[in-house]
Image (tube, rainbow, N blue to C red):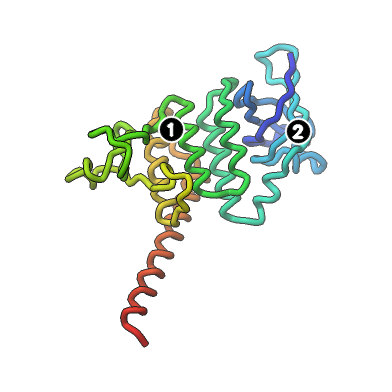
Amino acid sequence: MEWQAPAVVLGVSPYGEGDALACVLTADYGAWRGLARGGASRAKSSTWQAGNVIDARWIARLEESLGSFTAELSQAIAASAMQDPWRLGVLSAAVSLTAAALPEREPHPRVLAAHLTLNQGAIAELVRFEMVLLADLGFGLDLSACAVNGQANDLSFVSPRSGRAVSNEAAGKFRDRLLPLPLFLIDPEHTPTPAELAEGMRLTSHFLSRDLFGAQHKPLPASRIALAESLAVSSAGEEGEGRHAQRASHEGP
């Protein structure tokens, strides 16, 4: 058996002398593992970097066998991400989430399509990618209308239990028990602030931790935790600077 398809490299680990065990994501074959011949060698290791887009070919005598990969590099995403810590953090979080969450050999074309939007490394795109990952695995959030009154405007919160949106009016005295819904998740034209990006990551973290990784009794991948922590520190710092500047403008020289 064999197949050939565009793929995103999800991860590799050394195997023997010069080879590597690789996992890739394709539209039609899902997350698929195989032996990358020469994948750890100096000549080919740059191709098999997590996050790269490749043209992969897999071949084996039997479908259930490990089989072996050959690949041609299409987009060297990993190398370009090395120049930007935030972009590298987004890429690392996305591939580690996908590798850990998706069942093997199960098609998830929407997840692959969402991966390919991450090339610019925006945190907002990572949060949207995580929404797609949750939805494709049966844990989608419903942000179309308020769970309480059915209205589609003034949506400001998400129920941590049901994953449904709640309007500001309907939240009432329960707002402290709800998760904030950042505007960029319902308005694609809105440019999010660092604080809104941090809210977005907290929102998806809750459902990823509970529904995907909690069911497997595993924590979120370390790269995803590290990125969320870095963003929280960054957004807190920017908010502090903003408050300081505001006080200084009121106090005058």
Q: Where is residue 92 shown, x and y percent of the image?
A: 58, 44
Q: Residue furthest left?
A: 173
Which residue is depicted at the point 60% across and 26% down? Answer: 31
Give SS at disc 1: helix
Give SS at disc 2: strand
Instruction: Name the one closer to the observer, 196 or 90.
Output: 196
Mark carried by residue 213: 1
Amino acid type at mark 1: Phe
Up-down relation of residue 138 to residue 118 (above or below): above
Which residue is depicted at the point 80% across and 43% down? Answer: 42
For disc 2, the marked residue is: 19
Which residue is depicted at the point 31% across and 45% down? Answer: 156
Tell us which disc is closer to us: 1 or 2. Answer: 1
* The quarter of the displayed image where residue 174 is located: top left
Query: Can residue 41 be seen at all in this image of the molecule?
Result: yes
Amino acid type at mark 2: Asp
User: Mark 2 packing: few (<14 Cα in 10 Å), some, or many (20+)?
Assistant: some
Quadrant showing the N terminus: top right
Q: Is 47 on the left or on the right of 229, as rendered?
A: right
Mark carried by residue 121: none
Q: Where is residue 116 shown, x and y percent of the image?
A: 62, 38
Up-down relation of residue 233 to residue 166 (above or below): below
Q: Residue furthest right?
A: 43
Image label count = 2
> Is tag 1's residue or tag 2's residue first in the polypeptide sequence?
2
Q: Where is residue 28 shown, x and y percent of the image?
A: 63, 21
User: Mark 1 packing: few (<14 Cα in 10 Å), some, or many (20+)?
Assistant: some
